[in-house]
Amino acid sequence: MPSAAESHPPLRVALLGCGVVGTQVARLLTEQADDLASRVGAPLELVGIAVRDASAPRDAAVDRSLLTEDAAGLVERADIVVEVMGGTEPARSLLLRAIEAGAAVVTANKALLAEDGPTLYKAADAAGVDIYFEAAVAGAIPIVRPVRESLAGDRVRRVLGIVNGTTNYVLDQMATTGRGLDEAVREAQDLGYAEADPTADVEGYDAAAKAAILASLAFHTRVSLDDVAREGILAVTADDVAWAAQTGHVIKLLAIAERRDGGATGEAGVSVRVHPALVPTSHPLANVRGSFNAVFVEAESAGELMFYGRGAGGAPTASAVLGDVVSAARHRVLGGKGPQESTYAELPILPPSAAVTRYQVRLDVEDRPGVLAQVAHALAEHGVSIEAVRQPTARGAADVAEPGVAELLITTHAAPESALSATVAAVAELEPVRTITSVLRVEGA
Ligand code: NDP
Ligand code: HSE
C-alpha cells in the first residue's frame, strides 16, 4: 500500500524572497524534502521563488530555474505561500492575493503584521485558510505557538523579553569589547541579523512590532505598532555601558507588555513598551548574549516561563518558517485549520505615562553641603522614593567637568513613569544641578 506521502499529490509552495531567510528556506525545503514529505503526508514542491532581480548572484543552494520577478503570478499557482521579502508593500497585497486564491500563508514579516495584521487575519478567516507567523517574533524561538495555543487556557499577566538580535548583539559587543555602536551594527548586518534598514533595529521599531504581536496574542486584544511606547538604543553611550557594569547591571533593549486590572492601582488595560533598561547581572536576561533572544512570560496558573534561543539569522529563522509550513501543509492533507486571531478582550491601551518602572539617574551637581537634600526633596515632592544614592569615586575627579562638581547616581523605587519623568525635569531645574547625564530605567530587579 502506498504511504500517505506517496498517494497525496504534491503541495505547491511559493517562496516570496530569497535573501538571508529565503535562501535558507529554499535550501531546507530541498535538503529535507523526504523528511518533510513524511511529516506532512505529501511532498512539498517548491514551484517558484520571487525576487526583485532574478539575474543577481544567489547561493548555490538556490535552484536558479525557480527564480521569477513575477511574484503576483507565482502566488496564484501555490497551495502555500511563504513570504520572507519584508516591508509592507508589495508583501501585503501578495499575501491577500494568495489568501483570496485559497492558499495558506506563512510569513516572517513582523513589520507588516504589527501594522496591518488584522486585515490579513480577517481575509484568512473569511477564506478559511491558515496564516502562520512563528518566525515573525524572536527568530527560531517557539513563542508565538506557546502564547497563542499552549497558554490559551491561562491568563497571561506580563511578557518581558529581549526580542531583537541586532541590538542585543550591539549592546553585548559594546559591553564586552568596548566597540562603538556603528561598528557593532555593521557586524550584525554582515551576520544577517539586521533588517534591510538597520534603523528599524536600533531605533526599536523591530522590537516594538514584535512586542505588539506578542501583546495581541497574550492578552487577546488588538495592539498595533502605534500602541507601543518605543525608544531605541541610539542614546546609549559607552559611558552608560561602563556605569551599568560598575553598578552590577547590563543594558538590554527590553520589550515589556503588561496587563493591568485597574482598581486602586490605576486604569485597567494593556501597557506595551520597548526601551533600553538596566538589568541586574543576576537576572537570567542579563546572560542573554550576542544575537540570542529570550522571552519571559508570566501567567496566572503556569507561573513564570522562559523561552530562549537564536532570535535572528537565516537558518534559525528558516527553522521557524518550515515549522509553520509543515503545520499548514498537514492541514491541507488531513483537513482542519490553525487558530485564528482572538481579540475578544478589547482592552484599552494605557498611555506610556501609566507604566510603572524604576529609574537610575546620573547627574552632575555642585559639590557642597545641602545639595543632596535639595535633590532628595524634589523626588519626595513628586512621591518618588529613593532606593539608593551613590556619589561614585570610581571615575575620580578627573572625569568630572569642573572642580567642585560631584557626580550622583540615584536609583528610585518603582513609581509611575509620569511621576519619574516629572521628577527628573524638576531635578534638572534645581540651581546646583549642572547636568542630567543619563536616565535609564531599571527592570527585572
Ligand atoms: P533580505 O533583505 O535579506 O531579503 C529580502 C528578499 O526579498 C530578497 O531576496 C529580495 O529580492 C526580495 N524582495 C524584496 N522586495 C521584493 C519585491 N518587491 N519583489 C520581489 N522580491 C522582493 O531580508 P531577510 O531575509 O533578512 O528578511 C526577510 C523577512 O524576514 C523580513 O520580513 C524580516 O523582518 C524577517 N525576518 C528576518 C530575520 C533575519 O534574521 N534576517 C529574522 C526573522 C524575521 P532580491 O534578492 O532580488 O533583492
Ligand atoms: N533584525 C531582527 C533582529 C531579525 O535583529 O532581531 C529578527 O527578527
Image (spheres, rainbow, N blue to C red):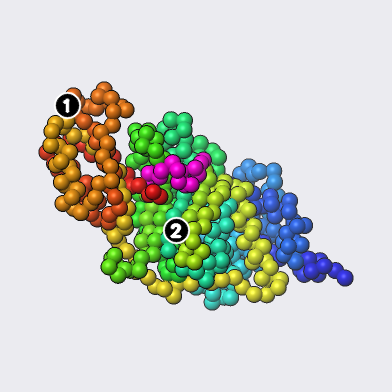
Q: Amino acid at mark 2?
A: Val
Viewer-side residue, 274 vs 100: 274
x, y (%) of residue 90?
50, 59
The residue indicated by pointer 1 is 404
Residue 355 relative to residue 141: left or right: left
Q: Earlier in the sequence, mark 1 or mark 2?
A: 2
Asked if 440 appears above or below 245 in the picture, the reply is below
Distance from disc 1 to disc 2, alpha carbons, whole Å, reads 45 Å
Q: Residue furthest top?
A: 398
Residue 327: image tag: none
Viewer-side residue, 140 vs 6: 140
Q: How many marks?
A: 2
Asked if 193 appears above or below 337 in the picture, the reply is above
Residue 42 relative to residue 253: left or right: right
Q: Amino acid at mark 1?
A: Gly
x, y (%) of residue 201?
44, 47
Q: Residue at x 54, y 50 (%)?
A: 308
Q: Quadrant of residue 270?
A: bottom left
Specify the segment rendered in magenta.
277-290
Q: Quadrant of residue 108?
A: bottom right
Q: Residue at x 64, y 66 (%)?
A: 328
The residue indicated by pointer 2 is 159
Q: Residue at x 36, y 65 (%)?
A: 260
